[in-house]
Amino acid sequence: MGDAILLIEILVLGVLVIGFLAIVITRGDKGMVQPLAEPLPSLPPVVLPEAKNVVAQDISEIRFAVGLRGYRTDQVDQVLDRLTEAIEQRDQVIADLQKQAEQYKQHGTD
């Protein structure tokens, strides 16, 4: 029975210590601990072509570096997939309109 009480006391003490440390660390903005510094731009930027030259494949090939305070990769992937689909649709509409314009020019000159 004495061993069980000792184990419970150790567990309670451990939870209290971890809770105290969590409070100290998360209150860095109050001067107790310095908050995390802004990340240094040590990685090359993610580069896309000029806006008028972006194609769906450019978005499909984008890869972001993973950081401590980075975005959730599943959400980034979802947005990139939606952008890729939207650009593919835009490119198809543009191609169709260019084809129609070319046909109009050919029929207009006949």
Image (tube, rainbow, N blue to C red):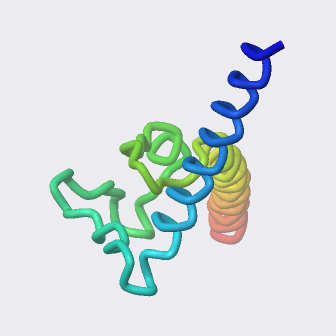
Taking depth in this image into account, of 35 and 17 the one nearest to the observer is 17
Taking depth in this image into account, of 97 and 65 the one nearest to the observer is 65
Residue 7, image x, y percentages: 70, 22
Location of residue 21 with respect to 77 vertically, above or below: below
The answer to whether residue 38 of the structure is visible from this angle is yes
Residue sitting at 58 percent across and 42 percent down? 73
The answer to whether residue 88 of the structure is visible from this angle is no
Residue 22 lies in quadrant:
bottom right
Taking depth in this image into account, of 41 and 57 the one nearest to the observer is 41
Taking depth in this image into account, of 110 and 47 the one nearest to the observer is 47
On the picture, is 110 further left or further right than 37? right
Residue sitting at 38 percent across and 78 percent down? 32
On the picture, is 34 further left or further right than 3? left
Location of residue 5 with respect to 79 vertically, above or below: above
Quarter of the image where the C terminus is located: bottom right
Residue 31, image x, y percentages: 37, 84
Residue sitting at 41 percent across and 41 percent down? 63
Residue 88, image x, y percentages: 66, 48
